Amino acid sequence: MSNLKKVLKNNEAKGNSVTVNPSYAMKQLIVKMKGEIGAALPSQLSSDRFQRVALTAFNSNPKLQNCDPMSFIAAMMQSAQLGLEPNTPLGQAYLIPYKVNGMEKVQFQIGYKGLLELAHRSEKLKSLYAHEVRENDEFDIDYGLEQKLIHKPLLKGDRGKIIGYYAVYHLEPNRYSFTFMTYDEILNNGKKYSKSFEGGIWENEFDSMAKKTVIKKLLKYAPLSIEMQKAIAFDESVKESISNDMLFIEPVESQLLDVSI
């Protein structure tokens, strides 16, 4: 039983079930840990701002309220230290509830737009983007000695079904690289590596997750900042403690999810 559930159960026994709820219990936990949280937060994010963002995320998904509270706070801290806001329309990051060894935990996951934001900040890449390719588009790729990618979306009429996704990064001066994955390759990768594939974010935001997948494949060979390398390495991890560098906290699981992409 999670700490939040214990708090609620104890209060129900005392007849306080009307005044105490998961949101209140989480708020009290954050207040209690204010010193530890404040020491670990980046300078641009205040404890009060963290509390507002955390409670908004917590209240937006009832399933998070059944998870281990420390894994929720740790996931929030990962997001905060990367400067990404979770569970918002920005699509930068997500806090996803799922089971680890039979217990409900919170997994931190970087979104497609979060990767773009981190790449932009790193100043290593001039630009980074991804697009879907549809069956009626004009599309051609060449992975030979002179790489070439041509994509002209059909502007009039039905573009047809999605057949794949590609990602491109540009460097200074005039250097670039790209990679392409078919729709089936992305689908199979999601099924194989992502615990949140069935009935989760993959179902609700397939396009964003597909773009994230092909971008992560491309970035395996890109010159990245140390921060971005760490962020990608610990994407889709679950942690239960906090520090001034969450990227050095070992995840709960013995093996990270989705490390091959």
Image (tube, rainbow, N blue to C red):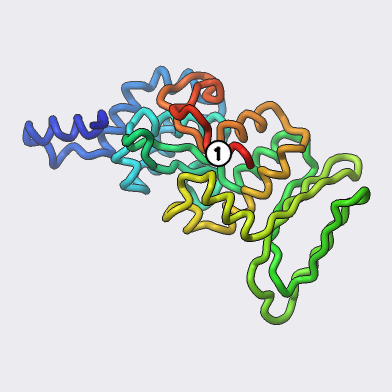
Quadrant showing the C terminus: top right
The image quadrant where one finds the N terminus is top left
Indicate the quadrant where residue 24 lies: top left
Q: Is residue 18 left or right of residue 73?
A: left
The type of residue carrying mark 1 is Leu
Q: At 42% from the left edge and 55% from the top edge, which residue is drawn?
A: 199
Looking at the image, which is closer to me, 143 or 127? Answer: 143
Task: Indicate the position of residue 75 as horizontal and vertical percent values.
Answer: 45, 33
Q: Is residue 254 visible?
A: yes
Residue 157: where, in percent of width, then height?
70, 81
Q: Residue at x 22, y 34 (%)?
A: 5
Q: Nearer the viewer, residue 38 or 259?
A: 259
Q: Nearer the viewer, residue 188 or 243?
A: 188
Q: Which residue is mark 1?
A: 84
Identified at 13% across, 30% down, the residue is 10
Secondary element under disc 1, as helix, strand or loop, is loop
Q: How many marks?
A: 1
Residue 3 to residue 167: above or below: above
Q: Residue 139: x and y, percent?
A: 79, 66
The residue sitting at 35% across, 42% down in the picture is 64
Q: Does the rendering let one see residue 46?
A: no
Q: Residue furthest bottom?
A: 157
* Label 1 neighbour load within 10 Å: few <14, some 14-19, many 20+: many
User: Is 28 displayed left or right of 51 in the figure?
Assistant: left
